[in-house]
Image (cartoon, helix red, strand yellow):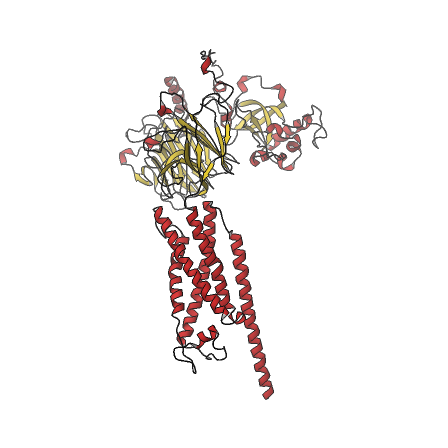
Amino acid sequence: MRVFHRLVVGSALLLAGAFGQEFNLSRNLVENFKMEWGVNLISETSEGTRIEGDTVSFKVTYQGEGWIALATSLNTRMHGSDAIIGIPGEGVSKYKLTGYTPNLMPEAQQTLVDATVEQADGVTTMIFTKLLKEKASEEIEILAEDEMYFLWAYGGILWAYGGSNNYPQTHQEVGFVKMTLVEKPVLGVSAGDEICVEGFVMDRFCINRGTLLDSSGGIRTLEGPDKHSLHCLVDVDECIGTPYEILIDPLPGNKTHCRGFSLSMKDSETVRNKARQLGKKGYCKTCTGELGDEEFGFRATVKGRVTSPGDYDFPPEIELISVEESSVGCSDDATKKLGLSSDKCVDDKFLRPDTETPATTPAPVPEDQVPGEGLICAKDYLTKTQLSPKLSLEYTVHQPDDTLPDKNTLRARLTFLGKGWVGFGISPEGNMNENDAIIGVPGGTVVKYHLASFTASPISKDRQTLEDFSIEQDSEKTVLTFSKLLQEEGEVAINPNGSNKFIWAYGSSNTLGHHQDRGSVDLPLVTCADGDSAQNIKPTMTAIPDERQWKSHGIMALVGWGFLTPIAIAASWCRDIIGAPLWFKIHMWFNCTTFLLTIPLFALAVATFSKNDRKHFSSSGHERMGLAMFILVFIQVIGGLARPHVPPPNTPPKTDAADAAESGTVSEEQAPPEKSKVRFAWEIIHKLSGEALLGCSMYQIDQGLLLYEKKKYSVFFSRTAYWAWVGSFLGLALVLAVGHKFLVVKKDHSESGGKAKGTE
């Protein structure tokens, strides 16, 4: 078979050699990044030189300007990968990645052929041909003729593109793709092929929308085309304004249809007229009912000629030959061809229709081993529980062999109602620090990580022992599944018949980072037996680590800086309204209380950080601002106690008349008309620093409450309520102070003007 394959492909290359590199397969990795490739045998370059062995040619297109890279990898990480990096203006070279650093390979290993990188009209394109198996043993072999998962054990392809800087530093975006270089032998069509297909007809508007336009229940388009009304298909402007596509039915056990073939707008109108003839008259405005009375799920038999082969993401385009009723079907097997977009809706029998699957008689199963009507432990989940409103967990402890306890596994499936990464781990203390977790990142893979206090690092390759794992995502949910051994060297053992404490988290995006929600839960595990009945349990939630400490920290901050300090500042602003000595007592005692609360709340934060081995005042602006305020409030209090005294005339020595006026022992009229320069300067500095502290405290409380929301602590006071209180109170105080001052000035001016008038 191998010899035959080489002869066939080799002959094809000899015929196509004059046309250079062949890119007969393609895939859009993201919206602005496309990869095209072709696997080939010994070929000649434009200079007539030859390269030995099988090769693969790549064309990578990035809709932007920057360096561009493609790499083979043995795992999901950059470290150890072999990268091809194209730098516009410099060229294309091979690199070995160490950590995140690209190291140029020696000249002897620079074996690329016809390698170019160009930028034009804001688009960067890299082309090269590479040996599948290089002479250098340390380079990763590309197993093109095998079905490979280029994400993990079988090898990997890492794609990345940079920003506007044409130098391979930090990437703008990076990702992994699972694919096969040599595709299934029959699947795929070429321009000029005649096809026949029978299936549901769907407008592209509903396909792109994700759910049926006329469905109140939000039915997914590719899962419920039978619920798609003919009214929507043939009457609604949004639907008839887009091309139609013919869907391919899913495989047994699956429910998602594939996008089979796409019609032009002109041919879509022809199919639409057929639908109107088959549609029930009166149900849709333009249906005639000449040939039927259908209301939902229009199917048809369509024959056409391929004009564009499409790829995995976009169906082939066809020129319509005929459209007939669904019952006609496709009698000629030779015309039953499908494009790459139908990959998930075909099986081996379609690909190799001449191969008969031999009938087999299953071996008899002893009566005592026949499972009941209940679960099958190897594939079902025994227990289901709700970890949070958005996250559910299904799990089973599976013991395949009583004599091999080291083969016992925990099989789990976590369903997150949203889009983001999902993580799950075992933690005796219920926190992240120094524990291991399984994290699935959509668009990437599922990997075991070691957790520090606030960081996650993939563990070594030899400990990546997960099985049957996947991370899948659609428009509504993200699902993480895995099977993990209960006992593994260097990891916390899972008790198969008792309570275990687990941690969970999920993110707000598909980039691994700060969690959107997290928690800790005690789960009772029990070994599954075939025939058991599924059960739902209510989990025992454990307290979030350090919640009590941070809640105490926040309450003291809110009482002092959120309530007492604004009142103290407002009393100073409105001193002429409140009058002495009351305003001064409010100002002094409320600020002193805030100062006394600041000491323990600051000490509590430092102690909590120290307990978790975290660096102080380095991870956020909230922490650094807290340190600055702690220092400044000390200075402010000391400055208030040591304010300068100015002895006025006719008062005992060492008595400050301004202070006496504040305390009420001397009236404002008896106070000296002018203050000393030192006192005047002190008042300005004291007022400005006090108001600066008030502004900083408003930022601190807002950010603190935001941190509470992120950590999912039970929030005792909302940010909205805080801003409503402080904004309205300080705003009112400011209006009163300014208004009173304006009235006093106006009164003084009026009295002064009256006296002047009387003297005239």
Q: Could you say where residue 465 lies in the image, as x and y percent from the top left?
A: 36, 29
Q: Could you say where residue 431 lies in the image, as x and y percent from the top left?
A: 39, 41
Q: Residue 729 or 183: which is nearer the viewer?
A: 729
Above or below residue 613? Residue 92 is: above
| Left or right of 497 on screen, residue 742 | right
Does residue 372 appear in this view? yes
Quadrant of the image occupied by residue 489? top left
Residue reaching furthest bottom? 760
Labels in figure, total: 0
Q: Residue 511 or 583: which is nearer the viewer?
A: 583
Quadrant of the image occupied by residue 286? top right
Q: Residue 240 or 376: which is nearer the viewer?
A: 376
Q: Residue 485 or 78: which is nearer the viewer?
A: 485
Residue in view at x 61 percent, y 31 percent: 266
The quarter of the picture where the C terminus appears is bottom right
Does residue 312 appear in this view? no
Residue reaching furthest right? 282
Q: Could you say where residue 379 lies in the image, as x and y percent from the top left?
A: 46, 24
The quarter of the picture where the N terminus appears is top left
